[in-house]
Image (tube, rainbow, N blue to C red):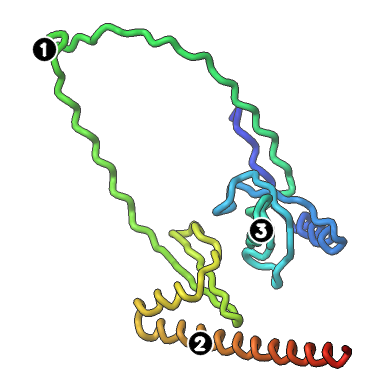
Amino acid sequence: MAGTRAEVKALDEADIERLRAALAEGKPTPVWFTSAAVGVETGQQAKVIAFDEPAEGDFIQVRPHGSRDVLSFSPAELTTVKPPARPKAVAAPAAVPVQAPAPVVEGIEPGGDAEPKPRQRRQPQQPVEITVTLHSTPEGEWSVDVLVGKKRTVRWVPVPAGDVAKVGRLLPAEVGEAIGVAITTARERQTRRVEQLKAELEAAQRALRDLG
């Protein structure tokens, strides 16, 4: 159909190999988000940071332009084709308001009030399946991912461990217990790490004093 913009070419195997080679040489090639990408603006530029292994699903890690966050996307959500520049909007001349004569409705005198039309009721939205996933690293860093139907609306956003603990107390006992064990284990790990760092600092300070 005339006037329809051509679909943007998503990444293929050759594109991915070129991106891998450029990244290995320290010269990452810029990519842009396609309309299939969720949670970002179509056409926004990004920089490839790393590739997950195995190369399945959302395995390409990128940093959107102007952001410090590193997000993972699939090849279908990225392209090496730079989108065309958007044309600048031209301000239209201001319209001069013209007062039109009041319409004459059969059975109603000019200047009278017509009965308002009944509002159309909105069709109720169909229920969709929502999947909320909480993920914790061994270091105790939590993140959340949300799928509404087949659309990912939240992509692994960091969540404070304290907020996760509060939610765990409102969930079934088995879920709360699992969350509590993960947080306790991470706390113990961090405590041991702090003690180790303190011992290393004290040893370094003693060595510095011995050196005069």
Q: Secondary structure at mark 2?
A: helix
Q: Residues within 10 Å of mark 1 (few under 14, many from 20)?
A: few
What separation in Å lies between label 3 and label 2 (alpha carbons)?
29 Å
Residue drawn at point x = 56 percent, y = 89 percent? 188
Q: Of 19 and 8, which appears nearest the observer?
A: 19
Q: Residues within 10 Å of mark 2 (few under 14, many from 20)?
A: few
Tell me the kind of residue under disc 3.
Arg
Question: Mark 1 = which residue?
Answer: 107
- Image-quadrant location for residue 130: bottom left
Residue 184 badge: 2
Q: Secondary structure at mark 1?
A: loop
Residue 194 badge: none
What separation in Å lies between label 1 and label 2 (alpha carbons)?
78 Å
Residue 123, above or below 181: above
x and y, in percent, of residue 209 in the image: 83, 90
What separation in Å lies between label 3 and label 1 (alpha carbons)?
66 Å
Question: Mark 3 = which residue?
Answer: 68
x and y, in percent, of residue 159 in the image: 51, 69
Residue drawn at point x = 70 percent, y = 87 percent? 197
Quarter of the picture holding the C terminus: bottom right
